[in-house]
Each structure stands twice: as structure tokens, then as C-alpha cells.
Image (cartoon, rainbow, N blue to C red):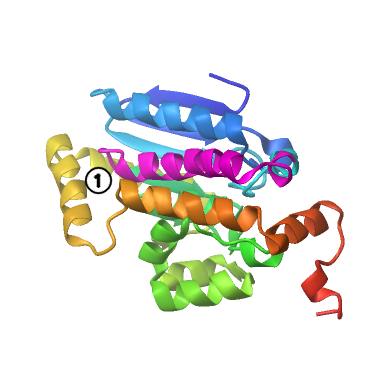
């Protein structure tokens, strides 16, 4: 359907696949806009009952595209606010799809990729999947993805992985709730198909109401104010001295100023 996404709809199941394998399905403003619009279209299509989000190639999603980061490095606060707002809106759109959503996590998911996993209703992963909330090492904050990640793994665990930016494996992701199930790679699609069958057995109107019910009763609802606030926070830190230094160091393949002592 585009250079960045593949879409296949069959028997009520929409499979949306990030299709930038050469850069590990990293996203930029184009992919964000196309994925947002695709999700809105699928949400409005009564024939679609389940949405599966996957990635082509070795990775699920590596987070932000380097070329996009280079452009962001020169953005003003106002440009960063608009840019971050688009990502925040994508995550909110994914979270608010009225049909069940499943993340098929066959490989690494880093930074914003973790946000995509967390914003889906269910996430199936393989032992080859690994995860990292890497923003702190760039002098940034995982602000836009934070409502979904904290909801998935809880605030205490989120603090650890937000602050340490350490890589953790699929077994740990399953233990803390980021992955709903962990299955061998050769069984991933069979497990996915079995789950889809279970979901298709439910009433679509009931499932939409169930999702709305969960949003109603869970704390910290991701409303428009929270979307704006998380976008504001990432825009603010991107234009801060530490944020600019962290991005510059990453792009220049050197240690940032706060890590020059070798740590």
C-alpha cells in the first residue's frame, strides 16, 4: 500500500506490517502519518474485526529513524512540539482502535517501538525479541510512550527501565507484562492464528464496549490533555542543552558529555 507499510485484510483480520527492514522498521514523520491514517481507516471499517501489527525483516521496530533524528536536532521548540504531537497521536490512535489489536513481536523493539507494543491490547513475542527504553542515554525522555509503557509494566518497573536504558530480553518482557505470551519463533504464527480465532468468536460491539470500559475504570486515562502534556515534555527536552548534546553524540557516534569519564 506504500513504501513504509504493507496491509493485508482477509477474513476480518487486518495485518499491518512495518516495511522498512533495511533500517529495522525505524519510523519517521512519513511512517507515523501513514500508520495513523491506516489505523483510522481500519477502525472505521466494520468488516475489520482484528488488527495485527507486525514488522518485516529482523526487527519489530527500532524506534526513531536516524535521518528523522538529524532533522529534529535542528528543530525549534514549536517544531518539536508539532512533531512529537504526531507521534503521541499515533499512539493514542492505536490505543483507541475499537477492535482488538495484537503486536506480533518477532524481533527487537526499541524506544518508540516499545510504545507500539505497549499500546496494543495483546502482544505475542518470541525469544528473539529484545527491548530497550533507550531515551535516557540520548539525554531524552520516553514521554510520548510513557502512558502506555507504564500501564503495561507498572510504574516501579518502568522507572527502572526508563532510567537505566538497559536492554532486557523477551522472558523479562513477559514477566513484567509487556508481552502477553512468549512462544517459540516457529510457533508464533500458529499462536497468533489461534488467538485471532478466539477474538473473532467475540461480539464486535461487545469488544468495543469492553475496551471503552477498561479505559473508563483504569487510572491515568490517556486523554487529550495527557497527549498534549507528553508531547510538550518531549519537545521541551529535545531543545534542552542535554537533549541536543545527547542527540548530537548519538549521531556523531561518540559518548555524550555526561559519559566522558568512560561510564
- Seen from the viewer's position, the closer of residues 127 and 132 is 132
205 sits left or right of 243 in the view = left
- Using the image, determine if residue 170 lies above or below residue 2: below
Q: Looking at the rendering, in which quadrant would you find the C terminus?
A: bottom right
Query: Is residue 51 something one can see in this rendering?
Result: yes
The foreground one among 192 and 239 is 239
Q: Which residues are magenta?
A: 71-100
Name the spot of residue 163 as percent of width and height, x first: 58, 74
Task: Name the residue carrying label 1.
Answer: 198
Density class for disc 1 (Cα within 10 Å; few <14, some 14-19, many ≥20) is: few
Foreground pick, 196 / 2:
2
| Residue 85 in the image: above or below residue 246 | above
Q: Is residue 191 visible?
A: no
Relative to 26, 174 lies left or right: left
When the figure is inspected, residue 243 is found, relative to residue 156, above or below; the finding is above
Query: Magenta stretch: residue 77 in it?
Result: yes
- Identify the residue at image location x=40%, y=73%: 155
Amino acid at each position: 500500500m506504500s513504501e513504509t507499510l504493507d496491509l493485508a485484510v482477509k477474513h476480518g483480520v487486518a495485518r499491518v506490517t512495518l516495511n522498512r527492514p533495511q533500517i529495522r522498521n525505524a519510523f519517521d514523520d512519513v511512517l507515523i502519518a501513514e500508520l495513523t491514517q491506516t489505523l483510522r481507516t481500519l477502525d472505521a471499517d466494520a468488516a475489520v474485526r482484528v488488527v495485527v501489527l507486525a514488522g518485516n525483516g529482523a526487527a519489530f521496530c527500532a524506534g526513531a529513524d536516524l535521518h528523522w533524528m538529524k532533522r529534529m536536532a535542528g528543530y525549534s521548540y514549536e517544531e518539536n512540539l508539532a512533531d512529537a504531537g504526531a507521534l503521541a497521536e499515533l499512539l493514542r490512535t492505536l490505543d483507541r482502535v475499537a477492535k482488538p489489536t495484537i503486536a506480533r513481536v518477532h524481533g527487537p523493539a526499541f524506544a518508540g517501538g516499545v510504545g507500539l507494543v505497549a499500546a496494543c491490547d495483546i502482544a505475542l513475542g518470541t525469544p528473539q525479541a529484545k527491548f530497550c527504553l533507550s531515551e535516557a542515554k540520548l539525554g531524552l525522555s520516553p514521554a510520548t510512550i510513557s502512558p502506555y509503557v507504564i500501564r503495561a509494566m507498572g510504574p516501579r518497573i518502568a522507572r527502572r527501565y526508563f532510567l537505566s536504558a538497559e536492554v532486557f530480553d523477551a522472558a523479562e518482557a513477559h514477566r513484567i507484562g509487556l508481552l502477553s505470551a512468549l512462544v517459540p519463533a516457529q510457533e508464533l504464527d500458529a499462536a497468533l492464528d489461534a488467538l485471532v480465532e478466539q477474538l473473532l468468536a467475540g461480539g464486535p460491539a461487545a469488544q468495543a464496549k469492553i475496551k471503552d470500559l477498561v479505559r473508563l475504570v483504569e487510572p491515568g486515562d490517556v486523554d487529550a490533555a495527557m497527549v498534549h502534556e507528553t508531547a510538550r515534555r518531549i519537545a521541551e527536552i529535545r531543545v534542552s542543552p542535554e537533549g541536543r548534546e545527547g542527540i548530537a553524540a548519538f549521531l556523531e557516534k561518540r559518548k555524550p558529555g555526561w559519559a566522558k569519564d568512560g561510564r
